[in-house]
Amino acid sequence: MSLVNDMLRDLESRQASADERAALGSLRAVDEGAAGRRAAQRRLWLLLPAAALALVAVLLVRQLPAPVPAQPPAAGVNAAAAVAEPVAAAVAAPADSRAPAAIQLLATLPQQSEQRFVLQLLLDRAPEYRRSEQSGVVSLRLPHLQMNDGGPRAGRLERDGRSLNWSLQPLGEGAELLLVGLGDDLQVLDRLEPAGERWQLWVEVPLQAEAEPPPAELPVASADEPAAAPQARAGEEARATRIQPVVAPAPSVAPTAPAAPVAVARAPQTSAAPVSTAQASAARASVASHRPDTLSEARQALLVGERGRAIALLEQLVRQQPEHREALRWLARAWLADGQGARLLAELPAQLARFPADSELRVLLARAQLQAGDTSAAIANLAARMPPLAGDPAYHALLAAIYQQAGQWQESARLYRNLVLLRPEQASWQLGLGIALEQLGERAAAGHHYRQALQGSGLDDDSRRYARERAQALGGQS
């Protein structure tokens, strides 16, 4: 089309003749603007789909808040992580706070009457404590107890020719309450009660002699033997069993072997200090009424001789709470006190398989084994898993005494040496070591330890007499 227009413009510019114009007279100029408009329209129609696509894309982008809040998940993850950090910190904080906090002793209040001796400890919160028993000795260990009250720390009572010593002394990171005396008649009842926002630990010792041994006192394993026999009878063990050092006569002198306890702690021979007014007022702080729990009821039933009721309560408690090891220990003690040693032998090994590190259960099983006459089984049981010496010296003293009963003097001497290194003032351990060394032929060393035993306290008259006789026979001075 533009070619025709070009030809016509050429004619105009050359001023062509009429003949030329006549030859091209049938041609008409083309509207080039219309053609441009048509081309523009075509281009527009071609661009419209692209524009529509672009518009759709824009609309889609603007509607992307649906996926865009997909960013909140990322923010949510960050927020969750941020929340997780405080939670982890909160979890870590209790983990750190699980480190046992110190328990403050607010008052120490000893009280005495004609019938009983009572020691009251006022504490800022409920403590965990462990009780162990042996012939004439009861120990209450209170981990993490801080004694800042300034109260009395020891005392001595005398009644009808018998004495009771008590002492509250630091032990490791806590303290130990020792009650020594009264021989096999020593009964100690302890209970923990709330007192407002405080807690009270009551320790009660009846002072009046009983017509018969206390029902809760576990029976002594005895053996019939002549006075000059090379081994003395086995008594009760530590905490629940009272095994005694085996005493053998010297070649030239044959005194009767005494029944010396395995581990008798020495208590300072001091009088109880007067109670301050502040302590007395603290002790009078509202003592809340207290309904004994099942375990306390069972222990009280044992003390008054109701063994059947105590066993029923303890068996029910163990069924309801199989992990309640303290109830299991008291049930084992009750079985022994009731003469049901066979039942203990049948059931306690399975419990020890569940709680292999429970040294008290091992001691109770060893006692039942000794009563059944199986000394080798008792030794194997106790030697299988021994606790640290500093944590449970009475356990080691029990095993040392059983070694003597079995005639294993070397093993007995080894354990007693460790014990007297730990506590040289323990007269019964010095006596046990002297007996073992004398049997091994170490007479000079044996005489030395006999004399050390005489310097300590806690031995009964028979044991002290025997130590004096052996010290004299071996050339020592009594």
Image: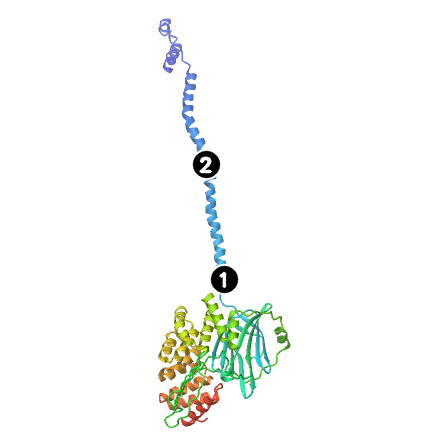
Picture layout, residue 268 above or below residue 318: below
Q: Secondary structure at mark 1?
A: helix
Q: Could you tell me if the residues under marks 1 and 2 are in contact, i.e. CB atoms within 8 Å?
A: no
What residue did someone put label 1 on? 94
- Locate residue 133, reporting x and y percent: 48, 78
Residue at point 47%, 68% (across, down)? 316
- Locate residue 81, reporting x and y percent: 47, 52
Name which residue type carries label 1.
Pro
Asked which quadrant contains residue 105, the reply is: bottom right
Q: Which numbered disc flags the more N-terminal residue, 1 or 2?
A: 2
Q: Secondary structure at mark 2?
A: helix
Quadrant that contains the N terminus = top left
Picture layout, residue 108 above or below residue 18: below
What residue did someone put label 2 on? 61
| Crowding near the residue tagged with mark 1, few <14, some 14–19, many ≥20 C-alpha atoms within 10 Å | few
Q: Is residue 271 visible?
A: yes
- Locate residue 171, reporting x and y percent: 49, 76
- Locate residue 370, reporting x and y percent: 39, 80
Residue at point 51%, 71% (across, down)? 295
Name which residue type carries label 2.
Val
Q: Is residue 321 visible?
A: no
Picture layout, residue 432 above or below residue 140: below
Discs 1/2, front: 1
Label ID, residue 6:
none
Left or right of residue 116, residue 79 in this image: left
Q: Nearer the viewer, residue 253 or 256?
A: 256
Left or right of residue 163, residue 61 in this image: left
